[in-house]
Amino acid sequence: MHTYEDVKAKKLENGIHEALNTPENEDELFEFAEYDPSSAEKNGYSNYSYWGCTFRAFFKRRTAVLLAIVLVLLVAFTIIQPMLPGQYDAIKINDYPMSKKQLKNVQPTVDNIHLTLPQGTPLQYAEFEIKDDPETSANWVAVSGQIARVPGRSGTKVTTFTLVEYGEEWCVAQYNGITGYVKSAELSVKPDKKRFDLNEYEGRFVTPYECFSNSPTIIYAAPTEFSNPDPNADGWLYTERKNLILGENGMCTTASETPLRIYPSAYGFLFGTNERGQDLWARVWSGTRTSLYIGFMVAIVEAIVGILVGILWGYVRQLDRLLTELYNVLDNIPTTIVLILIAYVMSPSVSTIIFAMCLTRWMGMARFIRNQIIIIRDRDYNVASRCLGSTPGQIMMKNLLPYLVSVIMLRMALSIPGAIGNEVFITYIGLGIPINTPSLGNLIDVGRKLFSSASLRYQLLFPTIVLSIITISFYIIGNAFADAADPRNHL
């Protein structure tokens, strides 16, 4: 009977015998197994994709997705807006070509039609020239149809005119023996006081009626009833040359129902004009481009410098004390003081604002990254990487940085409206971008000075709305994307 030791000895003897009789070609004893690196870990992991899971989680946030679409459209529109037809230049001062007076504080309107005349209305016309736009000068002419501007002051009878006939659109009026027309929608009669109140419309009165105005009222008439209008005075309107039948001695008649405009353009001032006659629509979008450029540049510099310093600060222990002391020194200097000093010393410009913000804003990002790195730098997978010979650079880029994607995206999303807010503040105290460079800060600073005037509040309203949309959108999108990018929320 063979024992267990006898069996082991026999197997060893057979093995030695086979080894001594091994053929010359040892490859015949082996067969290579197939190996596919891409499928090496299929048995250990599912088909998980970090970015795929992140975007799937983000798109479940309907509010954030909607605001992201709005923000993308807004940014795209700021870029293409100057290329659209009918856009006024953001820095050009628009004025009446005949009188050369600025189009100050024109209320927001879709078009600039002042009145429409029926076919066959006689008018007086004059040629005008716009040096920087010869095409406008060739296609448009100035016509005159105003015979009086009736002044007015509340409670005081200044000028009297006679209302002869009432019409749904125009009222016939007589002033100094000349018959003209007053827009009926602008007038209402208070028989007890025998005057017009331009802020109401009741549409009831008996004609003829002696009345006067609380506010300046324009009376229009066929220009054949007066002579030699002053080219530098109010009263000139503009229409396309094709709408008129030109005659002799500067006289013409309307070829069809003809709109007369306050400015030689078929397009209105959608957001109105400011006190210098500049188109507020163009300035708002130009200012949005400027402010977004500042915000994105500051956010990019903040991310690059802050992430680099933060990772080194948190992972390289030898640098911790040095960078901590540097941070304590810089952080004790108020950011507002730094912004004011830089803006005061250097000439005000977009680059100055960006430089001043970049000097300080990276510190918050660096401190936050450093604190996160300290939490995870000695976890098992990082210790294993060091034991396997991974360099500090590989560990920082492959192990640490991906863990921080969510918080980095959140801070970048919030830094853009924060930078825009700082630009608004610097402009508010008078050290921001020059007034001839449109920005949301400049527009809001000008608008706040006019807020006390009800008719001029639109100059603060429009840039404030755009700034609010940008700020709220970035905040909600940043929070939603940070939650979606957090690996702990991935299933």
Image (tube, helix red, strand yellow):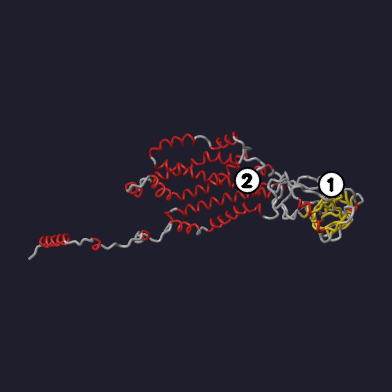
Res. 477 mark: none
- Circle 2 packing at 10 Å, graded few (<14), some (14-19), many (20+), is many
Which corner quadrant holds the C terminus?
bottom left
Q: Is residue 54 left or right of residue 384?
A: right
| Secondary structure of residue under mark 2 | helix
Percent across and percent down for residue 98 are 81, 47
Q: Earlier in the sequence, mark 1 or mark 2?
A: 1
Farthest residue to the right: give it.
177
**Residue 451 vertical position relative to residue 266 in the rendered view, above or below:** above
Compare residues 38 and 353 and report the one nearer the observer. 38
| Secondary structure of residue under mark 1 | loop
Circle 1 residue: 231
For residue 422, say whether it is visible.
yes
Farthest residue to the front: give it.
24
Compare residues 259 and 76 and report the one nearer the observer. 76
Q: CA distance from mark 1 to mark 2?
A: 37 Å
Among the 4 quarters of the image, the one containing residue 123: bottom right
Percent across and percent down for residue 42 are 36, 61
- What amino acid does circle 1 point to? Pro
Percent across and percent down for residue 443 are 65, 45
Circle 2 residue: 440
Residue at 55% over, 36% down: 338
Residue at 41% over, 42% down: 314
Q: Is residue 485 left or right of residue 182?
A: left
- What amino acid does circle 2 point to? Leu
Farthest residue to the left: give it.
1
